[in-house]
Image (cartoon, rainbow, N blue to C red):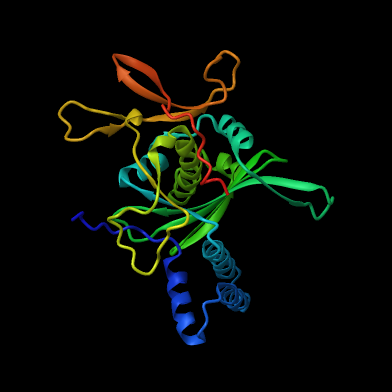
Amino acid sequence: MAKRITYSIPLRQVWKEYKKWCKVSKSTDGEQFFEELRLLAYKDQNITTRTATLRMASFWLNDYRKEILHVWFDDKELFGFLRDEVSLKDLDGIKTYLAQNGEPEEMPDPSTGKPYKWIKYLIGIHIPNEVDGFVFGFSLDLQRNEISLYICSDDGGGQIDETEYEALKDRTDWEAENIKKNFKFAINLIAYMECFPECVRDGVPDTNNINTYRYKDRSVQLGVSDKITETVKGAMRPHFRRGYIKYLSSDFYKNKQGQLIFVSETMVNAKSKTVEMSDDKKKIQDFQA
């Protein structure tokens, strides 16, 4: 029998409150539960906690409606690699790729009445052998060509757009570093899944610890591509290679134009760069909301 693994659970506290509410109210109407959460939040005089509660409630409603894709990491180190090690050297290129390949949402602009378009991703993160999961709402504004990130965890949450990210680049304090890592992780995760779709598998891990929360309809497992690892002499297991994900936009790349690639930086007497591409050219549809 496979060893049981404990995974982090996004929005765990709200789901617990929902289960309690169901027993007391004798109802399973998540829309009604959300309205009660929202009204309760507006009674909070502290604007910071009020905003955090409203954001968490909104994310929970998205989850209740099965609008969030749940990503289960095969390897905890992959999460850290995408957050801490993969640079954001080609943000404009990745935005171009997402704008061309994502599924846009549309609504009337309140000020002009004209269609307002953006690309949205709602993703819940499950990390092996961690307690707290988190969920983020990531959007690409097609009018302004700007990325924004909204993040929520049991410890709180926040938001940041790319302008703020750029402004934080020179700061090294803990708060700034944490914000930059969250922003970088969101972009890198989307790009990694597009770059290596063969690492994305449908379903929940058989070894998961889930009892109350069953994410079946919109769940994928995310594996490690051997193209981002290398075997170091004397090491017991492969190591991740530092690098960045790049969009090939130039006409120079006749056969690869329009694709995302992983560019790793390795040291062999001098610094050299190795380009890695997915063998699977199919486009992942399920994680585009």
Q: Is residue 34 left or right of residue 2?
A: right
Up-down relation of residue 228 to residue 179 (above or below): above
Residue in view at x 61 percent, y 69 percent: 47
Residue in view at x 45 percent, y 70 percent: 15
Residue in view at x 67 percent, y 38 percent: 145
Q: Position of residue 52 (x, y in %)?
A: 55, 65
| Quarter of the image that includes the N terminus | bottom left
39, 248: nearer the viewer? 248
Q: Position of residue 43 (x, y in %)?
A: 62, 79
Q: Position of residue 75 (x, y in %)?
A: 31, 45
Up-down relation of residue 206 to residue 48 (above or below): above
Q: Is residue 274 left or right of residue 288?
A: left
Residue extending farthest right: 112
Q: Is residue 193 left or right of residue 120?
A: left
Q: Position of residue 146 (x, y in %)?
A: 65, 41
287, 188: nearer the viewer? 287
